[in-house]
Image: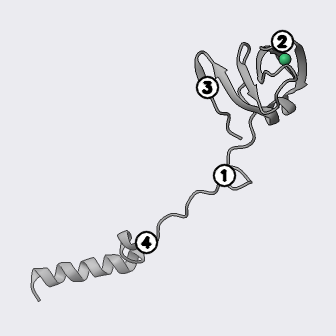
Amino acid sequence: MDITNNALALFLAILAGTGGWPLGRPAAPSRPPLTANGGTIPNMPMDIRLDDVLVLKKVHPCGGNAWLVYRVGADIGLRCTGCNRLVRLPRSEVERRVRRIRRGGEEIVPRR
Ligand SMILES: [Zn+2]
């Protein structure tokens, strides 16, 4: 028996002692989802800021559908850009009706 065979025997003995080829072990289980609903991002309030112009699905009787945000809180205060009428709507109502947000020359399509 030469030195090569001895080395091989030693190697096999180490493998037997450590439970097998270390590189052949199954990969670690994948991470569990971050949230209980399968990893999706939880509902976040829509990003509505003062001085945004909201384009709503519903057209105002005056013909305008763009509203300037003049107040942000539990209710969203909106001023019709067509006739300057002021309305206050619950945030949930605004989020359901908004189609686009104009902010600083940009048009944002909110994600739902
Ligand atoms: Zn109006």
Numbered tag placed on residue 107 in the rendering:
3
Of badges 4 and 3, nearer the viewer stands 3
Distance from Cα at disc 2 to Cα at disc 3: 22 Å
Task: Identify the mark at residue 25; answer none if there is no mark.
Answer: 4
Mark 2 burial class by Cα count in 10 Å: few <14, some 14-19, many 20+: few
Mark-to-mark CA distance, 2 and 4: 70 Å
Task: Report helix, strand or loop for mark 2.
Answer: loop
Give the quarter of the image for residue 31.
bottom right
Read off the residue under disc 1: 39
User: Does dot 1 land on a helix, a strand or a loop?
Assistant: loop
Residue 26 x %, y %: 46, 71
- Which numbered disc flags the more N-terminal residue, 2 or 1? 1
Residue located 29% across and 81% down the image: 12
Residue 57 sits in quarter = top right
Q: How busy is the neighbourhood of tag 3: few (under 14 within 10 Å), some, or many (20 plus)?
A: few
> At 37% across and 70% down in the image, what residue appears?
22
Residue 77, visible in the rendered structure: no
Name the amino acid, label 2.
Cys
Q: Toward which corner of the image does residue 84 lie, by quadrant? A: top right
Query: Which circle marks residue 83 in the picture?
Result: 2
